[in-house]
């Protein structure tokens, strides 16, 4: 499975660089906190590329963590990938409908907002970055489904995954205690190699690599890149046949 995950990263990275080349490049500009790269005209397309960059980077990071037995840290990374994949689906909606909702307009405003300002010899966060409530994003994603039952099921799945993996981010006791095992039992502070947690994390990764692949396919579709979409879809079929775990 590790080899399949690495293959997924390679094909996703290749597609990403093609898709990224289709929009404007970030430019080096001056802002209050210094000279930095920014997109001059924030757009749905640039937001999608930014989210996809974090998805693929997260997959690379999670693969390294899993190899060394850091299941807890891999799950924290999975939690971020969950949100980025949800954001990608959410952001694609205006490209398909041909119009921006108020929530999408606010999302872009918040995402590209500058925060740091100079105060004397230091920089401070003067304006807190607002967010679109995650439940609104879950609801918008669920509205893609054709039937009410499917909408409700999709919403509940996203909500459940979000809540479950939040325990790894915020350090819930039951989640941390997964690090405690062995004979005699002890806390594994340098990874959980040699424990059942490693196989569990490899299995859990299956859904993240697969769903992330779907996100890149959606972006190719939204960008009108049929060739890339077909290549990725062909790999998706290969993934489904090759994976030893059930894809959920």
Image (cartoon, grey):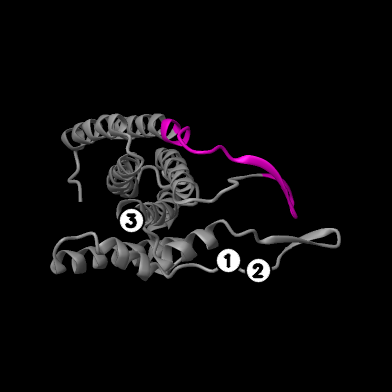
In the rendered image, the vertical position of residue 45 relative to residue 230, given as above or below? below
Q: Is residue 26 magenta?
A: yes
Q: CA distance from mark 3 to mark 2?
A: 28 Å
Numbered badge on residue 93: 3
Q: Residues within 10 Å of mark 3 (few under 14, many from 20)?
A: some
Name the residue at 44% across, 38% down. 60
**Furthest-right residue in this view:** 120
Circle 2 residues within 10 Å: few <14, some 14–19, many ≥20: few
Disc number placed over residue 127 in the picture, else none: 2
In this rendering, which labeled residue sits more in front, label 3 or label 2?
3
- Say which element carries label 2: loop
141 with respect to 153 (left or right): right
Q: Secondary structure at mark 1?
A: loop
The number of callouts visible is 3
Image location (x, y in percent) of residue 229: 28, 35
Q: Are marks 2 and 1 in contact (CB under 8 Å)?
A: yes
In space, the residues marked 2 and 1 are separated at their CA atoms by 6 Å
SS class, disc 3 = helix
In space, the residues marked 3 and 1 are separated at their CA atoms by: 23 Å
* Drawn side of residue 142 relative to residue 72, left or right: left
Image mark for residue 129: 1
Residue placed most toward the observer, 50 or 92: 92
Residue 182 visible in image: no
Whole-percent x and y of residue 151? 20, 66
Q: Name the residue: 58% across, 46% down.
A: 39
Q: Could you tell me if the residues under marks 3 and 2 are in contact, i.e. CB atoms within 8 Å? A: no
Residue interval drawn in magenta: 17-36
Q: Quadrant of the N terminus?
A: top left
In front here: 30 or 139? Answer: 30
């Amino acid at each position: 499975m590790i080899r399949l995950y690495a293959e997924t990263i390679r094909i996703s990275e290749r597609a990403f660089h093609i898709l990224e080349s289709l929009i404007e490049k970030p430019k080096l500009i001056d802002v209050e906190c210094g000279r930095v790269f920014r997109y001059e005209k924030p757009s749905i397309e640039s937001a999608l590329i930014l989210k996809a960059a974090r998805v693929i980077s997260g997959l690379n990071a999670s693969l390294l963590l899993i190899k060394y037995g850091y299941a807890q840290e891999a799950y924290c990374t999975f939690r971020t990938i969950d949100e980025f994949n949800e954001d990608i689906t959410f952001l694609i909606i205006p490209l398909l409908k041909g119009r921006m909702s108020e929530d999408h307009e606010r999302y872009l405003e918040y995402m590209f907002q500058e925060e740091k300002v100079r105060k004397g010899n230091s920089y401070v966060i003067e304006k807190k970055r607002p967010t679109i409530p995650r439940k609104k994003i879950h609801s918008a994603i669920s509205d893609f489904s054709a039937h009410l039952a499917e909408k409700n099921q999709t919403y509940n799945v996203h909500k459940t995954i979000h809540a479950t993996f939040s325990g790894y981010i915020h350090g819930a006791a039951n989640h941390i205690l997964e690090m405690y095992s062995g004979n005699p039992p002890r806390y594994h502070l340098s990874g959980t190699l040699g424990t059942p947690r490693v196989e569990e994390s490899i299995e859990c990764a299956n859904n993240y690599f697969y769903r992330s692949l779907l996100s890149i396919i959606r972006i190719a579709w939204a960008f009108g890149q049929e060739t890339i979409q077909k290549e990725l879809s062909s790999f998706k079929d290969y993934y489904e046949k090759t994976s030893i775990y059930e894809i959920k």
